[in-house]
Amino acid sequence: RFHGRVSLRKAIALSLNTVTVRLMLELGADYVRRYAESLGIELPKVEDYSFALGSYGVRPVELANAYAVFASGGIYAKPYLIGEVRGADGHVIARTGLSERVLIDMVSADRAAQEGSPGSDRIELKTVAHDRRSFKPTPTDLADLFGFDRIEARRVISPQIAYLTTSLLESVVREGTGMRALALGKPCAGKTGTTNDSRDAWFIGYTPDILCAVWVGFDDARPLGSRETGAKAALPIWLRFMKAATKGKPAKGFPIPPGIVFARVDPETGLLASQDQPDAYVEAFVEGTAPAEFAPGVLPAGLPQDISSLDDLSGL
């Protein structure tokens, strides 16, 4: 189905991939590849515009970590996967060597990432006790804790760009292919994904506090079935996990950083809309990039909407 001229928001919400291809043609394959690398995704160093359609495979941890950049306001942090494995009775089956679960203090991590100072290998961490209820700030030597000289945490995109991306992904849940995620009952953002012949089904989504990536597929890449899309095969798994992970936690929206402004826009042109235009919607912009012109046929507030009455303005 051809949707005509659409906004990037609508294209992402409905998975209209021709729009992402046009965007990549505009930006260039090399730029997109380098941008993906800054988010932790490894792509071949070739001039291949099929990147826009997901022609190269990525690991779930790569994609989860890339989305975590948007969720964290633009900070990239090196992922650590498993602390320990326990049996049903609670005994430890295997341990990787990490004695504690930790959350990066994002303020300290951001400061260290921007300063790049010699002392940035000592970032204030919040130690999470095993009952998951006790949080205690403590200065921890990262080399002792992880066996590395420093934890990799750096700003790769601005808080404003991270928020705009999250805002677009919220539309996927509100009105697009990820609407099943509304059943979480909390603000969330995410994206479905389905490859050709339904060989892979994805859903990656997050709240302000937690992110989860789900991939469904076979090791030998055989098709899942013609109806097994990301929304049908992967999203229900995500939803079941997230309901348990966020149970009892208050619902809260994504924080809006300074430098973001909002404007009512016309869906056909992207220009300013009148206050009473029924199909207009509110769009977020980085300050200084919002449209300044009104859509054709729309007059600024305060001017008469009846064209015949413009004769009264002839003396202006």
Image (cartoon, rainbow, N blue to C red):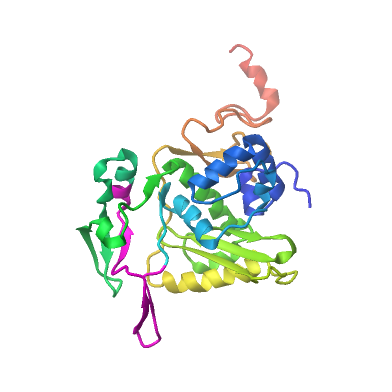
Q: Position of residue 275 (x, y in %)?
A: 57, 39
- The residue at the point 28 percent across, 69 percent down is 99
Query: Relative to residue 293, is residue 23 depicted above or below?
Result: below
Q: Is residue 288 left or right of residue 278?
A: left
Q: Which residues are magenta?
A: 82-109
Query: Relative to residue 126, is residue 87 depicted above or below?
Result: below
Q: Residue furthest top?
A: 315
Does residue 163 belong to the magenta stretch? no
Residue 27 in which image quadrant: top right
Query: Relative to residue 108, is residue 137 depicted above or below?
Result: below
Regarding residue 125, the answer to whether it shows in the image is: no
- The residue at the point 53 percent across, 33 percent down is 290
Does residue 99 belong to the magenta stretch? yes
Q: Is residue 103 left or right of residue 252?
A: left
Between residues 238 and 125, which one lies in front from this camera angle?
125
Quadrant into which the C terminus falls: top right
- The residue at the point 67 percent across, 18 percent down is 311
Q: Position of residue 135 (x, y in %)?
A: 25, 65
Regarding residue 234, the answer to whether it shows in the image is: yes
Residue 116 in which image quadrant: top left
Q: Position of residue 257 (x, y in %)?
A: 40, 43
Q: Residue furthest bottom?
A: 89
